[in-house]
Image: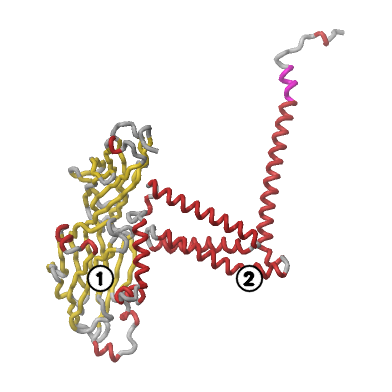
Amino acid sequence: MADNSSQPTNPAVTPASSSQPGKLSKAAGKLSKAASGVAKAGRALGGAGKTVIQIAASPYTGTTSRKDRILTNVPGFGIFGAGIGILLVIFLGLFGRGTAAFIFGAILCGVIGAAIGLFWSYFPKAGRSIMISITLIVFLAFVFVLIGYWRTGIMPAYFGEAGPKIGYGLAVIGDKLSCFNFMNDEKFRECWMPGGWETETQEEIIAIDVQFKTLDLSYDGKEKEVRAEVQVNNKVGEGTKFTIDPKCYIDNKQVDTESFGTKEGDMLVFYERDIMQKATIVCKVPADFLKDKNRIKAKIELTRPVIHSIQWPAYTIEKESLEKNENLPAEIFEGEGKMIGYAGIPYEFGIGVEESVPLTEGKHSLYIKLKKKVGYSGISEVKQINYLRVGSIGETAPLSNCEGFKREGDVFVIKDITEEKIKAEKIQNGKIFYCEVDVSPEEDPQKVLFKSEINYLVGFKKEQDVLITGTSATA
């Protein structure tokens, strides 16, 4: 019989075969650790869930004194939290873009604040102090981030043409505080007496935004570029073809400007389109503008078109019928006029009368208002009014005359109010145009529709702080 013990072993096979149990052991160890980790995570989540359930159920499962304390505190802290949330959104709303966003923010912050308040109410005094500290830390962190974004100029573009402007917020607050000036009867009535003119915000026919793409530059002794993108929505059938000529300023000094996009000559042109149109603006920054600076302020100025279109319905009726008939529909007594505005545009546009309605026989004054919103001084201002049209639809209240206007068919029109005339007549803050309505009513109420449209140019500024880095930039 052969002695197998003397046969040589295969070195290529033996080590691999002998190491297999060790690999399996290591894999099993890893699986065991993973399973243990999952189990710990599961226990932690289970414990957290159990704690939340216990806290939520504590008014019903705790001792009588604990039930009474929690149930007594919950409403008060919930209302307190909601109040804090709403105050926060009012403060932030000074920099916002529109009524709808403001209302949504108030509701959202109110709900979040109420939830925090409710959760807070479950804690005893010591726990409540901890919650106060956490809340203050989170709030202060948010404020410092907001301030940091503002100071570095990296504030998101959706804050719009009006912001971020601390002066704008202060102007709004100052306007509200001036309501308490009892010596100014006109201001007091404007603030506290109900107004007959309805005001609403609409979507722009022509919407323009400028978004800076360059947020920082590196100084190396060479000329640099600050780039920005123009975005335009110009609705087909409602807008109008227009051109813009942007100008660049660095620290309030004009610099060379280039633009790229669809052009007519040196001007960017935007047509009526169903899709968003874009163009690029490039500001040339000389090297000496960057030396020994840690930031520069880039500003783009352009003149953009705005179209406001408005309709306001009113009713006419014979005075005798108005006095005798007690069963007239309520709608004929509603509204003295209507104002509309667009988010980010500093002017509202309105049409109406400043007397009770319905209109009875005789002559009445119809007012067309271009009114600057509070807090927009220095941000944007009207440069030129291309045209203003006004007319009425209805047999009982035709326009008989409009001061300074010319009749064109069924409407009155005023055109080409230049920048020089705007400055001479101080129209930058708005203007009231006057028309005369000759009312010949009937026995029954008759509806009349007054219509007006204005096309004007407004100077638009967009600013951005650009950070500077480099060996020669100061700290």
- Please state which of residues 346 and 185 is positioned toward the viewer in this rendering: 185
Q: Residue at x 47, y 61 (%)?
A: 88
Q: Tag 1 or tag 2, which sits nearer the N-term? A: 2
Q: Which residue is mark 2?
A: 72
Q: Amino acid at mark 2?
A: Thr
User: For numbered disc 1, what is the local secondary structure?
Assistant: strand
Is residue 394 found inside the magenta-colored segment of the image?
A: no
Q: Which of these two is toward me, 324 or 116? A: 116
Q: Is residue 195 visible?
A: no
Numbered disc in front, either 2 or 1: 2
In the picture shown, does residue 163 fall above or below 173? above
What colouring method underlies this structural image?
Answer: secondary structure
Element class at badge 2: helix
Badge 1 crowding class, 10 Å Cα cut-off, few under 14, some 14 to 19, many 20 or more, is many
Magenta-tinted stretch: 14-20
267 on left or right of 59: left
Where is residue 154 shown, x and y percent of the image? 39, 46
Q: Which residue is mark 1?
A: 351
Specify whether 443 is left or right of 154: left
Q: Are marks 2 and 1 in contact (CB under 8 Å)?
A: no
Return the x and y of residue 277 as percentages of the image width and height: 30, 48
Counting other residues with Cα less than 10 Å from the Cα at mark 2, is it few (<14), some (14-19), or many (20 or more)?
Answer: few
Quadrant in the picture for the N terminus: top right
Q: Quadrant of residue 312 in the image?
A: bottom left
Asked whether 396 or 217 is in front, the reply is: 217
Task: Name the side, left or right, on which 173 lies relative to 420.
Answer: right
Identify which amino acid the numbered label 1 is placed on: Ile
Which quarter of the rendering shows the C terminus?
top left
Q: Quadrant of residue 96?
A: bottom left
